[in-house]
Each structure stands twice: as C-alpha cells, then as structure tokens.
Image (cartoon, rainbow, N blue to C red):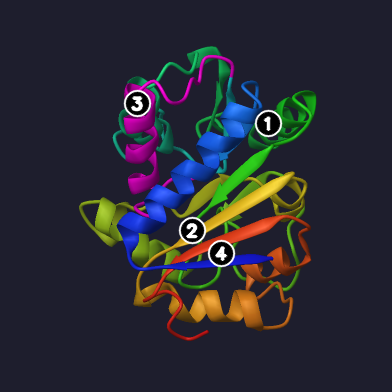
Amino acid sequence: MRIIIVKDYDEMSSKAARIISSQVTLNPKSVLGLATGSTPLGTYKELIDLYNKKEIDFGSVKTFNLDEYYGIEKQNEQSYHYFMMNNLFKYINVPLENVNIPNGNAKNIEEECLRYESEIEKEGGVDIQILGIGANGHIGFNEPNVNFETRTHLVTLDERTIEANSRFFKDKESVPKKAISMGIKTIMDSKKILLIASGEGKAEAVEKTIKGKVDPKVPASILQLHKDVTFIIDKAAASKL
C-alpha cells in the first residue's frame, strides 16, 4: 500500500492524472477502470489537458466504468453514461466502441451483470482501476454489508449514499435506489488500484480503510489486501490518519 498525501484537490487530481498517463504511455492498449462522481472530475480535466498537449493518446485504450444507476436511460443527464461522455470521452480520442458502461436499463439485469463480467475477462482484466470512496466506505456502489459482494451485481443503495448523491438531482426522492456495480472481487482483480479522496467528509472513511480491520462494513478496507494499491489523498481527507 502506497499513501501519497497532497496539499489539496488540485494536486490530488494532477498526480492521479500523471499516474494514469504513465500507465497509458507504458501500455497504449491499457484497460482503464473509471469512476464517476465529483472526486475524479479534476483528474479527468487533467487528462483532457494532457491529451490536448499531445502527451497522451487514448486511441487504443479500453475503458470499463465501475457502475451505473438502475432503471435509468443512458441519455438521462443523471446517468453515468452521460457523465462520462460529457466530462471525458467526448474530449479525448478513445474509440466509443472501446467504452464499456453497465446498461442500467437492461431488461434482464442478471444477464447484463454476467455480460459485463465476461467483457472484462475477455480483455484480461483491468490494468488500473480508479476509485473514489464514499463517506460510508463504499467503493463503486459496494455498500457496507455483512459480506463482500464478489462480481458485478445489482445493489440497493445505502441511505447515506442516496443522501450524498441527492445534490446531483432535483431532490432526494429523485435519486435511484438501486445501481449496477462491479463487485469487490472484480475490483480486487485489477492489476493496479488508484484511490483518490478529498475533503474532511472522507476522513473517517479513509482512516477506517487504511488503519481499520478488513471488514465488509467498510468495503474499501479490502484494499489493504491488494498487492498494488496507491492512495492519493489531500490533507483534509488524511486528517484522521
């Protein structure tokens, strides 16, 4: 486990983008695992900037997103498909046929989860998985539970997650109550993991993840067992370490 404590959100975003850029430079056919939410936005802006400076080429990269809301069409402005298109993909040269995001509106969700897992396996797994962390310790949409969910699956969202995500919707009632998420085993199978966290609101979750016991009630704590995981956290998020 490698822990990098930085001054602020901007430095966190810059360092994370540089690590991702190095991965793609070393292996132009890298498989990237991507996250959504406010935390990686700065990282994506940095990657777009590196692309515009011709320092990185996404032409042979493939991507897999961690999750997607259930029962929402990809054209919906709150979908993670829309988020990724408008915050990263349309500004870089990744071929859209290389972009993979769970279909939250699939008729058969179980089949969709199996299909998604199969696509990841077909590519030989994820080379570097980008993670944020929820205030309750969730990674992807793997919520606190009595056990670790293994593979891509349908999740019932925790009340704290719904509350946190309500800022993106007109009100709390509009937030979807379920989502499709990569499972813990899928995430842990990634060759490298990069977790980014910013702000005092993440400090307790970061502390439990790094210093606490491995416990499905803090899903991110499983990262203690990964062979190549890097945490980039700003001073506020590291305040309880």
Residue 212, x across and y down, in percent: 66, 83
Q: Amino acid at mark 1?
A: Tyr
Pointer 4 with pointer 3, Cβ within 8 A: no
Q: Nearer the viewer, mark 1 or mark 2?
A: 2
Q: Which residues are magenta?
A: 35-60
Tag 2 near tag 3, CB within 8 Å: no
Q: Amino acid at mark 4?
A: His
The crowd level at tag 4 (other Cα within 10 Å; few <14, some 14-19, many 20+) is: many
Q: Residue under circle 1?
A: 116
> Which numbered mark, 4 or 3, is in the foreground of this view?
4
Report how many numbered discs are placed on residues in the image. 4
At a point 78% along the width and 65% down the height, the residue shown is 225
**For mark 2, what is the residue?**
196
Please name the residue that numbered disc 3 is placed on.
75
User: Mark 1 falls on what kind of element?
Assistant: helix
Q: Which residue is mark 4?
A: 138
User: Which residue of the protein is positioned furthest toward the left in this rendering?
Assistant: 170
Secondary structure category for the residue under label 3: loop
Compare residues 164 and 84 and report the one nearer the observer.
84
Q: Which label lies toward us, 2 or 3? A: 2
Measure how far apart labels 2 and 3 are at the Cα level. 27 Å
Mark positioned earlier in the residue sequence (4 or 3): 3
